[in-house]
C-alpha cells in the first residue's frame, strides 16, 4: 500500500488491534470501481476489538480502478 498511499494517508486510517480501516465507501460504476477513505468508522468482523486510533478527519484519499484496462488512478485531494 505504501506504493499508492503516502505515509500520512496510511497514518490517517482508523486502526483496531488487528486491522487498519481503509475505505469509507467503494462502489462499481459500470466498469469503474471508485473508492474513498480513510474510513471514519471502526468496523469489525467480530464484536470484540481494541481501538488503537481513530481516523484523521483532515486527511482523505480517493481513487478509481478501471476494470477493463486494470488501471488504478489516484485522485487529487479536494481543496477545502
Image: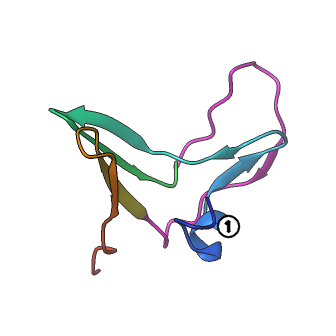
Q: Position of residue 59 (x, y in %)?
A: 49, 70
Looking at the rendered structure, the secondary structure element under dot 1 is helix
The N terminus, quarter of image: bottom right
Q: Position of residue 29 (x, y in %)?
A: 18, 35
Against 37, residue 80 (above or below) is: below
Considering every residue shown, the one lying at the far front of the view is 69
Rate crowding at label 1 as few (under 14), some (14 to 19) or many (20 or more) other CA atoms within 10 Å.
Answer: some
Which residue occupies 67% across, 67% down? 11
Answer above or below: position of 17 versus 12. Answer: above
Residue 70: % across, % down:
33, 46
Q: Quadrant of residue 7?
A: bottom right
Q: Residue furthest top?
A: 46
Residue 75 falls left or right of residue 40: left
- In front: 7, or 3? 3
User: In the current view of this chain or complex, which residue is farthest to the bottom?
Assistant: 79
In the rendered image, the vertical position of residue 20 relative to residue 74, given as above or below: above
Q: Which residues are magenta?
A: 40-60
In the figure, residue 17 lies in which quadrant?
Answer: top right
20 on left or right of 69: right
Direction from residue 8 to residue 27 in the image, left or right: left
Percent across and percent down for residue 63 are 35, 57
Q: Main secondary structure of the magenta part?
A: loop
Q: For mark 1, what is the residue?
A: 11
Answer with left or right where residue 39 lies relative to residue 76: right
Compare residues 25 and 70 and report the one nearer the observer.
Answer: 70
Residue with the most extreme left position: 30
The residue depicted at 62 percent of the width and 33 percent of the height is 43
State which quarter of the image contains the C terminus: bottom left
**Is residue 55 on the magenta stretch?**
yes
Amino acid at each position: 500500500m505504501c506504493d499508492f498511499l503516502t505515509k500520512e494517508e496510511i497514518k490517517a486510517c482508523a486502526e483496531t488491534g488487528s486491522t487498519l480501516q481503509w475505505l469509507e465507501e467503494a462502489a462499481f460504476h459500470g466498469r469503474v470501481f471508485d473508492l474513498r477513505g480513510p474510513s471514519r468508522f471502526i468496523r469489525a468482523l467480530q464484536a470484540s476489538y481494541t481501538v488503537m486510533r481513530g481516523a484523521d478527519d483532515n486527511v482523505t484519499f480517493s481513487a478509481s480502478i478501471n476494470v477493463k484496462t486494470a488501471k488504478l488512478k489516484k485522485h487529487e485531494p479536494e481543496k477545502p
